[in-house]
Image (cartoon, rainbow, N blue to C red):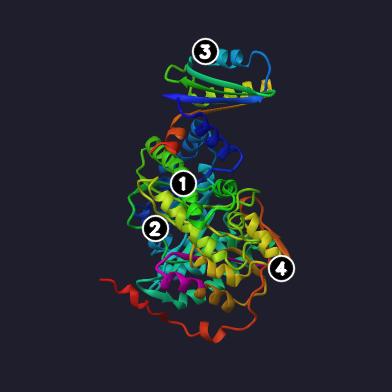
Amino acid sequence: MKAVISVTGKDTTGIIAKVSTKCFEYGGNIIDISQSVMKEYFAMMMLVEIDGLNVPFSEFVDSMTRLGEECGLVINTMHEDIFNAMHRI
Amino acid sequence: MINTNDILETINMIREENLDIRTITMGISLLDCISEDENRLCQKIYDKITVKAKDLVKTGTEIEKKYGIPIVNKRVSVTPVSLIGGSLSPEGFIHVAKTLDNAAKSLGIDFIGGFGALVHKGATPSDEKLISVIPEALSETEFVCSSINVATTKSGINMDAVAEMGRTVKRTAFLTKDRNSIGCAKFVVFANVPEDNPFMAGAFHGVGEPDAVVSVGVSGPGVVCSAISRLGDCDFTTLAEVIKKTAFKITRVGQLVAFEASKMMGVPFGIVDLSLAPTPAVGDSVAHILEQMGLEVCGAHGTTAALALLNDAVKKGGVMASSNVGGLSGAFIPVSEDAGMISAVGRGALSIEKLEAMTAVCSVGLDMIVIDGDTPEDVISAIIADEISIGVANTKTTAVRLIPAYGKHPGDTVDFGGLLGHAPVIKLNEYSPSRFISRGGRIPAPIHSLKN
């Protein structure tokens, strides 16, 4: 199972480092990243395998949201099924 | 990897356009709770509901977290109480209502529906006893919702019941007068009521349903409105296409949530109700969709046509997205719960007559409309009769949820708070239907009910 983590906010140094460190702490395996910076805004999508998480998924979601709040970013963590359901027949 | 634009579209729908799952509703049969002893009946009802739905709120919260989509309400619907309370006294029915209320409280759910009866062809003594205490039951409970089906296309309209409904609405308004007559917001009168509707106040668990079932009601007027606004001035075919595609996406999320909830609780999946259910929040209005289509204000000439297009496209888009569609499925037009409707009534653009016309082409009926607190009972009954006839003649569900707010008159505004919103008191026709309503009996079923 995979989750999509989206990160948006003002660009600073170390955003990818912070998010990926947090994923590593919880046992998430990053399998794809795409990111771009438009003017001073940062946007990143991360696809993370969540089968090996060492906490329940809901705790992982909360922890990523908290990380976002601490760093002044908006981090959404959602199970990939919602995107598959909505955009694929 | 999933397309980045698709991800952003989904996140935007949820964060900016108020896409949510309006309700996960568990239907529970109470037929096996029947007992001659009132206390035993109530105990069995309490036990069954609190055992069957014990994980409902927890499941809803977990799904919310997993998919990042808000689930606004968790609800329970039960077998119409008149069917299980044959041996009760009228006071016994109030006891059952309070039992349902306690069960809802202990589960932490938002509403419990089913304190009602099906009297479209006539009422049993049990139905009559239940109906006689609806005002008391609604004023003495917090979470209980009540609905009465007074007509079907097959059986015609039970006008004795319609006359009684006017009295019931009026008395409910009086007994909850200290809270803007809010009891009436929890009471709805139906024609052709569906047995699997997950939306309140009309949800109940039909007798043809299994022991327990999970259904989901989706929402998303804001998403449709934004999609139309991005289109600009296109023709109607393109407009309908975009609404269909948007409805498909919304409903797919509903199907996903329903399937997941059913799996997690070990309860069969019932239906997805693909309704556009507004809230008073800005950007979550059905009226604003109609205005986005090109009407200056909702209620202007053209509103019925716009709503018909919207309702049809929502169904066409949604039906392929779910394995089982049911309930009310269509666009809701509750006045107090829709920022655009509230403003349209306030500006004098939207009248009760126009609302009635709109109900011929949309999902339900005259909903959450605040009327003069001094409106006579027979006028309320006559409004119900008109609306119910539209349902019977068109083989569709229609319903009436009117609030004759005690002590309020045209020009006043009434605030219910939360999802129930606020609304100006709407003006009614001043002439009397008294002689017509007092006739009693049944209006026969229309000729097209004879389909066999």
For the residues beneath circles 2 and 4, the answer to whether they share a chain is: yes
The kind of residue on which mark 4 rests is Lys
Question: Is B404 one of the magenta-colored residues?
Answer: yes
Residue B114 makes an appearance in the image: no
Q: Earlier in the sequence, mark 2 or mark 4?
A: 2
In this view, the residue in front, B205 or B142, is: B205
Q: Which chain is home to disc 2?
A: B
Mark 3 — residue? A24
Question: Gap in Å between the C-alphas at discs 2 and 1?
Answer: 28 Å
The kind of residue on which mark 2 rests is Glu
Image mark for residue B63: none
Mark 4 burial class by Cα count in 10 Å: few <14, some 14-19, many 20+: some
For the residues beneath circles 3 and 1, the answer to whether they share a chain is: no
Contact (Cβ within 8 Å) of mark 2 with mark 3? no
Q: Which SS class for mark 3?
A: helix
Contact (Cβ within 8 Å) of mark 2 with mark 4? no
Q: Is residue B318 above or below residue A12?
A: below
Quarter of the image for residue B424 reads bottom right
Task: From the image, state whether disc 2 or disc 1 is nearer to you.
Answer: 1
Q: Which chain is home to disc 3?
A: A
Mark 4 — residue? B408
Image mark for residue B245: 1
Q: Earlier in the sequence, mark 2 or mark 1?
A: 2
Q: Is residue B415 above or below residue B323?
A: below
Question: Gap in Å between the C-alphas at discs 3 and 1?
Answer: 38 Å
Expressed as whole percent of the image width and height from the top left, the position of residue B318 reads 43, 49
| Residue at left offset 46%, top offset 74% | B389
Image mark for residue B195: 2
